[in-house]
Amino acid sequence: MALPERELQRTLRDVIIETMHAWSRDVLERPHRGFGGLPTRPFARAARLKGTIDWQVHPFDVRDPLDEDGELMTMIAAFSSDTAYETLFVIHPDRRAMSATALEAFVARLNARLAGLPALADLRVFEAHPESHFSIGGVLPRVSPFPSFQVLSHSLLKRASDSLRGSGYYDRFSPETLRALGLPRE
């Protein structure tokens, strides 16, 4: 018996998310000597396997005014109130939609906007881009197949980073990167 045709069709969204899953598996989740023998993103595998990443393919605009009732901010607010997810991963479907520099500026603006909203002030945003130059000890951990950003709770990030103390993970981070992450903490 043949399956209905709609079940056989993979959408562009499916392909993009599968590509991002493969990137996570093959790049972020692999141990790397530059990170003390840990993966570049030590908790990515567990989050992916537990299904606590909300993968969204969304053609966001780096010029978005970030209005509280706008589509993007509404998506972030919905994520923030949904306890099923630890990470919101927003992926732009067009690899050439924006430069890495434009995405970095957008993420800085988005972080500032979230900090000004009490209900969302605990959230932090990080970008990834096919042409990212973000480097930690010569490793480019934010080079991704598509322009994207991830939204996570600062509280969750702090607990995760505290668990990595003494592991060698942060040994090659620059002082500027450590400060941006809120390290060292006393």
Image: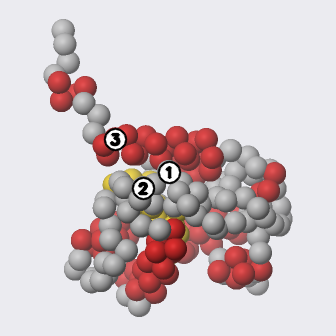
Looking at the rendered image, the disc whose residue lies closer to the viewer, 3 or 2, is: 2
| Residue holding disc 2 | 95
Tag 2 secondary structure: loop
Relative height, residue 180 to residue 5 (above, below): below
**Looking at the picture, how far across and down is residue 45, in whole percent?**
58, 46
Q: Which image quarter is the C terminus in?
A: bottom right
Q: Give the left or right position of residue 112, taking residue 69 as reference.
A: right
Relative height, residue 41 to residue 117 (above, below): above
| Residue holding disc 1 | 145
Relative height, residue 148 to residue 110 (above, below): above
| Residue holding disc 3 | 14
Q: Residues within 10 Å of mark 1 (few under 14, many from 20)?
A: some
Q: CA distance from mark 3 to mark 1?
A: 14 Å
Q: Residues within 10 Å of mark 3 (few under 14, many from 20)?
A: few
For marks 3 and 2, the one nearer the N-term is 3
Instruction: Examine the rendering and report whether any part of residue 152 can be seen.
Output: no
Looking at the rendered image, the disc whose residue lies closer to the viewer, 3 or 1, is: 1
Question: Amino acid under label 1?
Answer: Pro
